[in-house]
Every structure is written in C-alpha cells, then in structure tokens.
Image (cartoon, rainbow, N blue to C red):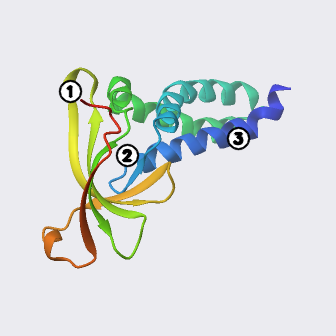
C-alpha cells in the first residue's frame, strides 16, 4: 500500500519545492495566503518525511540513492537558510492601494503592497504587478518615469487587503 504512494508523494514534494523556489525568485509571488502557507509549511514538514520515506520504501541501492539525494539537498538548503527564517517569510504580500492601471491590459497594475512581518511590523513595497491568476502574480520594479508614460492611468484605489485601520 505505501509503495503505491511513492510516485504521487514525490510529485507533490517536487511541486512544493518548485512553488517555494518560484516564490523566492525576484519576479514571481504567490498571492494567495493559504497556498503560500501550505507551500512553506509543507516544505518544512514534507522534506524530512519524504527523505525518510524514500529511504525505507525504495528497495535497491540505486533507487534509494536517486530517491534520497534531492530531499537530502533540500534538507541541507533548509538548514543553511534556517527553518525559522523560512517560517518568518510565510506571509503573502497584500495590496493596500492600486496606484496605476495599465490602459492596454487589465491584469497589469502598479500597487503599493504590505506584508505582515510578525513581531517586526510590516514590509512595504511599490511594484508593477501582472496577475497570472488570483493566486499568482509576476512583479517588476516600478519605472522611474511612471507619471510620463501614457499607458499608465492614475487611479489611487484603496484596497486595504491587510485590513489596517
């Protein structure tokens, strides 16, 4: 029974690592808090479990080596980064104000965003956002001459997704 789960569990693990890596890249963010929490907590819990699972479920030495190298490298990466640092960055960026909308694309905006930083207060940023879906977004730095660009329409629309009063 447990051996039938080895492929789905390893695919789930690879998907978790991929989403975590993408979210920590410069240009991609997970917008949905539930998905981001699942990915970050899943990475911290799933990695040692899949390492142990693969070690015991695979029969041959070659299978064990192949099944445990990747999870072992991820465990090492987690220890280098620090599990608490990973857990501390679990909060998603929330839009507080949509500053500009793109006249050519409804999915592109320039937003002022905030991120809860637990005991440290809030992180803030202003970024150009392109929504892939309601769950994922691509971000870029805001151009310096944004006021002079004709494709950007100033809207200053309050969103307050963090519900700050």
Above or below for 11 versus 27: above
Kindly identify the residue that appears in the image at 26 percent across and 69 percent down.
153
Q: Earlier in the sequence, mark 3 or mark 1?
A: 3
Q: Quick one: quadrant of the N terminus?
A: top right
Q: Which quadrant of the structure image shows residue 160?
A: top left
Near mark 3 (Cα within 10 A), the count class, few <14, some 14-19 or many ≥20, is few
Identified at 24% across, 29% down, the residue is: 165
In the image, farthest residue toward the bottom: 150
Q: Secondary structure at mark 3?
A: helix
- Identify the mark at residue 132; answer none if there is no mark: none
Which of 165/152 is in front? Answer: 165
Residue 70 percent location from the top left of the image: 55, 40
Identify the mark nearer the N-term, 2 or 1. 2
Per the image, the residue denoted by label 2 is 24
Disc 3 from disc 2: Cα separation:
32 Å
Q: Residues within 10 Å of mark 2 (few under 14, many from 20)?
A: few
What residue appears at the point 52 percent right and 38 percent down from the top-left corner?
A: 35
**Label 1 Cα neighbours within 10 Å, binned few <14 / some 14-19 / many ≥20:** few
Which residue lies most toward the right here? 1
Q: Residue at x 19, y 68 (%)?
A: 143
Q: Secondary structure at mark 1?
A: loop
Labels 3 and 1 touching (C-beta < 8 A): no
Q: Which residue is mark 1?
A: 121
**Residue corresponding to mark 3:** 62
**Residue 122 horizontal/vertical position (percent):** 22, 32
Question: Mark 2 and mark 1: span between their CA atoms?
Answer: 20 Å
């Amino acid at each position: 029974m447990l051996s039938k789960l080895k492929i789905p569990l390893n695919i789930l693990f690879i998907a978790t690592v991929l989403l975590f890596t993408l979210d920590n890249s410069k240009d991609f963010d997970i917008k949905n808090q539930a998905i981001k929490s699942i990915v970050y907590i899943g990475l911290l819990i799933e990695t040692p479990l899949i390492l142990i699972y693969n070690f015991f479920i695979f029969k041959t030495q070659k299978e064990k080596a192949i099944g445990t190298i990747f999870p072992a490298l991820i465990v090492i990466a987690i220890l280098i980064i620090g599990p608490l640092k990973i857990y501390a960055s679990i909060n998603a960026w929330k839009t507080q104000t949509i500053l500009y909308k793109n006249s050519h694309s409804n999915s592109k905006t320039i937003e002022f965003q905030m991120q809860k930083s637990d005991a440290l207060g809030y992180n803030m940023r202003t970024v150009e956002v392109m929504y892939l879906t309601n769950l994922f977004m691509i971000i870029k730095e805001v151009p310096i001459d944004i006021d002079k660009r004709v494709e950007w329409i100033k809207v200053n629309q309050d969103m307050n997704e963090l519900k700050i009063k």
